[in-house]
Image (cartoon, helix red, strand yellow):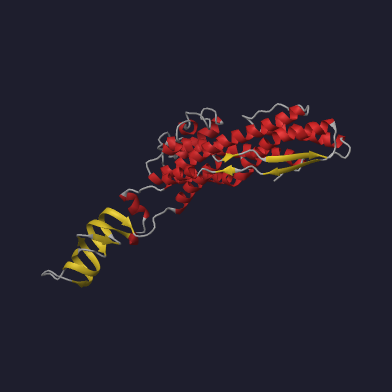
Amino acid sequence: MNKNLRYSVSPVVSVLLLLGCKGMGALAPFSSAACPQLESGDPLSATYAADALVNARIAAFVAASASLHELSLEMSGTASQACASMAADLGATVPASNEGADPGSSTKASCGALAARIDQILEAGVSAKVKVDAQAPRCEVDASTKAECSGKCEVELTPGEIVARCDPGKLSGRCEGTCTGRCDGTCDGACDGACSAKNASGECEGQCDGQCNGSCDATCHAGCKGEWQAPKCEAKLTPPKASADCQASCSARAEFKASCEPAKVNVEASADVEEVTKLVATLRAHLPLLLKAQIGMGKRVLGEVETVVRIGADMPNAIGEAGLQAAACVAAAAHASTQASVRIRVSVEASAKVSGKVGAST
């Protein structure tokens, strides 16, 4: 092997390779070493990259991932506890689970045991039926939560970024050099059009009604062979994908942080049997919280969950050479959002097996 051979690997790839090799051990998705902003403080206020647009996009994604992670734990915990309480009331044994290694397994275990016990009770009772009328939980999104984040997506570009991102034909400003477009002031040089004053050599030294190819003492439009001063873009300057993804992360974060009330339920039974009576009582006590988790904290946000996971998958290609800290946060947040997605989906399915058996799906 040639010892002088060098390989260039981007910061994002380096972090992803590290995560793959260590199995998320030393660089765990929510460890302070990988990305402190995921654990504490305000992810929106942190600095991840020098480029303003890239920084805003990362900040919004990390903030959304952190909120999704928190929601998934709360949703799974609420559903698991509701099912475990009902299972205990009905004498069912909940098997052990490992939530850390298997996201959603605690809800799957408790709700699975409860669903099996409900089957036993309803099958044992002679023509016993349980009827549940349920109203979906109400959830409210705080508009200020989205507004705070969305404001971060609207960044002011530096002069260099404006020149780089704007269609050259739409640029304008002071030109320190040769203006090769329309000049709002005095054009000193060649004028492709009518010139209000010319020098002895026949060159323009006044207003040019056309295109100027020389110095311009006012705003130059379209072209500058030199350095732009205070450039402006005469078209809408919005990098569509970056801006859209930033706003999508903000919208998702607001939904994840919404406040939801327990569902309202009315439970009735067709048979006055001891086990059925116990079932009715425990459903009245704990089903509202289960439906809150299943529908309000889970099913309601599945679309936003998919969006955040998709943004996380695209993010490594979007941040370029933002640096190792930015790459670490992106990799950790992407992993965390994927795990949270699994936890929520598994918990929703497990909860639905219980609510469906008593006709409480809304």
Image coordinates of residue 189 in percent, x first then y, are: 18, 65
Q: Residue furthest right?
A: 126
Front one among 70 and 58: 70
Q: Is residue 269 left or right of residue 46?
A: right
Q: Residue furthest bottom?
A: 194
How many marks the image carries: the answer is 0
The answer to whether one can see residue 6 in this image is: no
In the figure, residue 148 lies in which quadrant? top left
Q: Is residue 312 left or right of residue 77?
A: left
Image coordinates of residue 58 in percent, x first then y, are: 45, 41
Q: Residue at x 51, y 46 (%)?
A: 251
Image coordinates of residue 236 in percent, x first then y, are: 39, 57
- Image height check: is 21 above or below 215? above
The answer to whether one can see residue 239 in this image is: yes
Q: Is residue 163 left or right of residue 118?
A: left
- Image height check: is 233 above or below 136? below
Q: Residue at x 62, y 45 (%)?
A: 300
Q: Residue at x 48, y 45 (%)?
A: 317
Image coordinates of residue 260 in percent, x first then y, are: 59, 40
Q: Residue at x 38, y 47 (%)?
A: 155
Q: Residue furthest left?
A: 200
In the figure, residue 344 lies in which quadrant? top right
